[in-house]
Image (cartoon, helix red, strand yellow):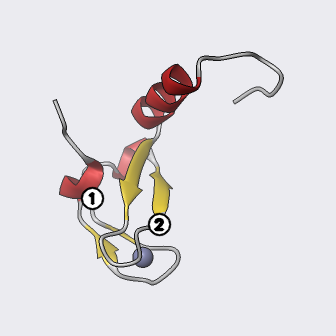
């Protein structure tokens, strides 16, 4: 992510979500960036330690 490059914030957010999976902790609500390698795995929350299942990655379409 380069700074100083004017990007549509929505576009940037979408790109960010696509390139690195983002996951919201169901317990504390914090958003994580998850490595693409782990996008199909449950990952522990960095903040509260609870496991965030891959399904919470959000398939809204
Ligand atoms: Zn958490």
Q: Residue at x 80, y 28 (%)?
A: 3
**Camera-nearest label, 2 or 1:** 2
Above or below, comparing residue 23 to residue 17 in the picture? below
Q: Quadrant of the C terminus?
A: top left
Q: Is residue 12 left or right of residue 34?
A: right
Above or below, comparing residue 32 to residue 2 in the picture? below
Q: Position of residue 37 (x, y in %)?
A: 39, 46
Using the image as rendered, state which of residue 8 and residue 36 is in the foreground.
8
Secondary structure of the residue carrying tag 1 is loop
Residue that mark 1 sits on: 41
Instruction: Give the alpha-carbon distance from disc 2 to disc 1, as whole Å.
Output: 18 Å
Q: Position of residue 30 (x, y in %)?
A: 47, 66
- Say whether mark 2 is within 8 Å of ligand 1: yes
Residue that mark 2 sits on: 30
Assess disc 1: are there few (<14), some (14-19) or many (≥20) residues with their C-alpha within 10 Å of its C-alpha.
some
Q: Is residue 2 left or right of residue 39?
A: right
Q: Quadrant of ligand 1?
A: bottom left
Q: Quadrant of residue 25?
A: bottom left
């Amino acid at each position: 992510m380069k700074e100083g490059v004017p990007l549509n914030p929505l576009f940037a957010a979408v790109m960010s979500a696509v390139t690195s999976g983002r996951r919201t902790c169901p317990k504390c609500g914090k958003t994580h960036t998850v490595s693409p390698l782990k996008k199909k795995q449950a990952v522990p929350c960095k903040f509260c330690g609870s496991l965030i299942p891959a399904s919470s990655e959000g398939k809204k379409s």
